Image (tube, rainbow, N blue to C red):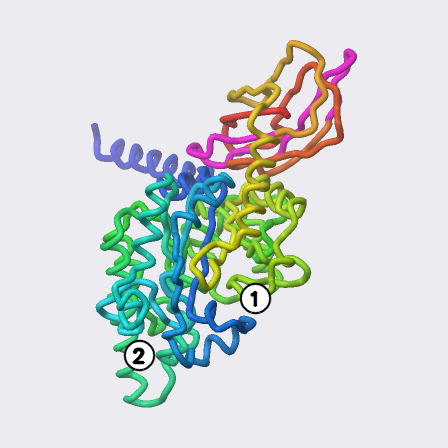
Amino acid sequence: MKFRDLILLLFVFNYIESHTQKTRIENPIPNKAQLAWQRAELGAVFHYDLHVFDNKKYRQTGNRTNPVADYQVFNPQKLDTDQWIRAIKKAGFKFAIITATHETGFALYPSLVNPYNVRALNWKNGKGDIVRDFVNSCRKYGIQPGIYIGIRWNSFFGVHDFKVNGTGIFQLKRQAYYNKMVEGMVKELCTQYGPLFEIWFDGGASHPDLGAPDVLPIVKKYQPDCLFYHNYQLAEARWGGSESGTVPYPCWATFPTPYSHTGDSTTDHINLLRHGDPNGKYWMPAMSDAPLRGYNGRHEWFWEPGDEKNIFPLEKLMHMYYNSVGHNSTLIMGLTPDPNGLLPKADVKRLEEWGETIKKTFSNPIASTAGKGDRILLSLENSTIIEKIVLQEDITMGQRVRAYNIQAYSNGEWETIAKGQSIGHKRIHKIDPTEVEQLRLEITQKILPPVMELISIY
């Protein structure tokens, strides 16, 4: 081959490659942890801290700045983490998270780097380890365990928004001590309790370049298969923009940046958190979260006296389910044990009712199918009245559908009974009772050939 021909060939190759890069469709897919997290659909976060025992109403702002006067009030004489986990197991939850530390800075496990922990208690003569009990209970009942680590606020060490109080060299030395302590705690929690499903940094974990502890490398080294949530470097899931237990529709599992938010509370950014970005380059599914005791205008993540009337009624919980799991989001409910160390009976009862309702509604589909392509047909043996339709993409292939119609065939005619945009892991349509002989999913917009993992009717 002549040199001139070689140059021409290279030019053509580079042109084709450049053109391909410009026209290539972005199609992010979930990693192993994200896939498991989305398929789990329902999880719980158990909030437990010193102020559960003070018999007062919880005040978050004050709790972030005012140390608890006497940490010896922590004394759960009937602690039973098995009881906690049995309750969520009955409700159909698949994973659970424990607040190893929250805003008081008090650690629920015997840390060797943070002196403010259960080792200092009279309770169990300083030999308690609630994180260990919790993880053991999760594994006993087949629930995936996770850990919540609060480092943004710490009233004991005087930390607010990751910054230790003080000025000058005094503040710098205390900040360095705090950062090292936090990094040591993250290593302890990542190495002492076996494989974890999720690590949740409350309010994020900032960024080492901003003077905060450097936690991401620790988590990735010791818990490579765990979902990381989250800091300014990485978010493997995103907050869905509210603590209502719901996300609006459409909710896409993709996002334009590898981190979810940086404290930006503008309307545009909140909407991005809620809806995601169908053209985003990063897989980052949405979390819906709410406390179980969040009814009647209340919003209580921690146990308080006389709060049972504020447990969400069953119909509100089902509304959450349809508008979180049914909108391609994972729902995490906040639960709080009482001062005895037990999940209150009223909370347990409501969780059981909720689980039974979900199971009764969705355990026995009238018919189901799966398939590839722009048109998928579901035929019935007999004409049947349906009220709910569940769609699921095979998200191991990404989120490919951009718009669709659902059509019902009855009395010799096709009629569109539902439309949508985002499907993702799961989209649930509630429709007026409709008699159908056949159902047809018609994909009207896509970025790649659609792959439907499941289409079910109820």
* Quadrant position of residue 435: top right
Instruction: Name the quadrant of the C terminus.
Output: top right
User: Residue 284 location in percent, x, y?
Assistant: 46, 48
The residue singled out by tag 1 in the image is 305
Q: Callout 1, which amino acid? A: Pro
Judge by depth and name the residue closer to the eye, 445 or 319. 319
55 or 68: nearer the eye? 55
Tell me if residue 402 can be seen.
Answer: no
In what quadrant of the picture does the N terminus appear? top left
The rendered magenta stretch, by its main secondary structure, is classed as: strand
The spot of residue 260 in percent (x, y) is 47, 57
Q: Residue at x 40, y 73 (%)?
A: 73
Q: Is residue 233 left or right of residue 61?
A: left
Task: Give the number of the disc on residue 39.
Answer: none
Find the magenta span and give its range: 390-416
Residue 356 drawn above or below residue 264: above
Label 2 near label 1: C-beta < 8 Å?
A: no
Dot 2 falls on a residue whose secondary structure is helix
Drawn side of residue 288 relative to residue 295, left or right: left
Q: Secondary structure at mark 1?
A: loop
Q: Is residue 77 visible?
A: yes
Q: CA distance from mark 1 to mark 2?
A: 37 Å
Query: In percent of the image, x 37 and y 78: which residue is there?
Result: 156
Above/below status of 447 relative to 330: above
Q: Which residue is mark 2?
A: 175
Mark sitting earlier along the chain (1/2): 2
Q: Nearer the viewer, residue 293 or 81?
A: 81
Q: Residue at x 58, y 42 (%)?
A: 354
The amino acid pointed to by label 2 is: Gln
Judged left or right of residue 210, residue 417 is: right
